[in-house]
Image: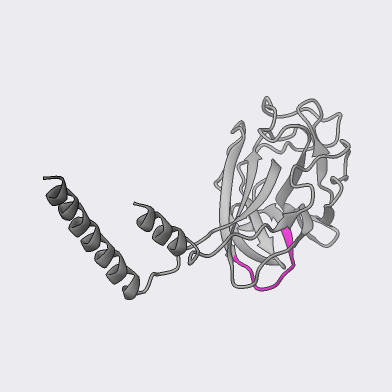
Amino acid sequence: MRLFAMTFAAIGLSVASASAATITNGSLTGPVGNSVVPPGWSIARQSPDTNDVNNNVGGGIPFAATPSVSPDGGTWVGIGGDPIAVVDGATFNESIATTIFDLVPNTNYVLSWYAANFGAETGPGYTGAGAIQALIDGTPIGTGGLLNLGDGWDLQNVGFLATSATAVLSFQLDPATLTRSYLSIDGVSIRTSVQPIPLPASVFLLLGGLATLGAVGRRRARRDAA
């Protein structure tokens, strides 16, 4: 048994190890405010807000659906959009961004976040369905599930392959499903998607030989005991 344990421990070394990439303030913790984002993040486009369960659109604007406390706690960011509105020369689709550090090139990662749709009772009303899209260096890598007004916090995931040690991560509403909507995002995190390295045939031959030796040893022990 000890020999088998040592062998499997050695084999375990052949599996790719995880690397801890760094996202600053993935909890999106910061002061509540209109056109304000938490420390470690920047406004990539137009005017996203920092909210909590008591303050919408930075404060003073009613939620269109009853909000709930984020699973990550504290504040979150609200991003809105409207396919027929133009702000600063572009379709209204707010966006936030940050830089991911300590990525390992050619490594697969899983990006996760919580999303909800509490809407906003402002102007014509931001009460439509929507989905949050993640981008790396400006290129979409995936979109979370579609959330209707009143849908609470949902854990969403997309995968991507790192091509450099740092990358700009941004979020926006998915242009393909954009309606007049206002979604919430919180708890952004990243982890490696570790894939086992295929073991060579020689390893399986070794394991087979060890199994045979073990069986022979047990037979000898029984014979000696007799």
Applied colour scheme = one colour
Reply yes or no: does residue 163 show up in magenta: yes
Image coordinates for residue 3, horizontal then vertical, percent: 37, 58
Image coordinates for residue 4, horizontal then vertical, percent: 35, 57
Q: Which residues are magenta?
A: 161-170
Q: Is residue 166 visible?
A: yes
For the point 88% across and 45% down, which residue is it? Answer: 36
Front-most of residues 140 and 110: 110
Q: Quadrant of residue 5?
A: bottom left
For the point 79% across and 25% down, which residue is it? Answer: 54
Question: In the rendered view, would you say 200 is above or below 5?
Answer: below
Front-most of residues 35 and 193: 193
Image coordinates for residue 81, horizontal then vertical, percent: 72, 49
Number of numbered callouts drawn: 0
Q: Quadrant of residue 38?
A: top right
Image coordinates for residue 27, horizontal then vertical, percent: 75, 42
Question: In the rendered view, would you say 53 is above or below 127?
Answer: above
Asked whether, in this view, residue 5 is left or right of residue 161, the answer is left
Q: Is residue 182 visible?
A: no
Reply yes or no: does residue 156 show up in magenta: no
Front-most of residues 131 and 200: 200
Asked whether, in this view, residue 17 is left or right of residue 170, the answer is left
For the point 40% across and 69% down, which residue is it? Answer: 198
Asked whether, in this view, residue 28 is left or right of residue 160, the answer is right
Q: Quadrant of the C terminus?
A: top left
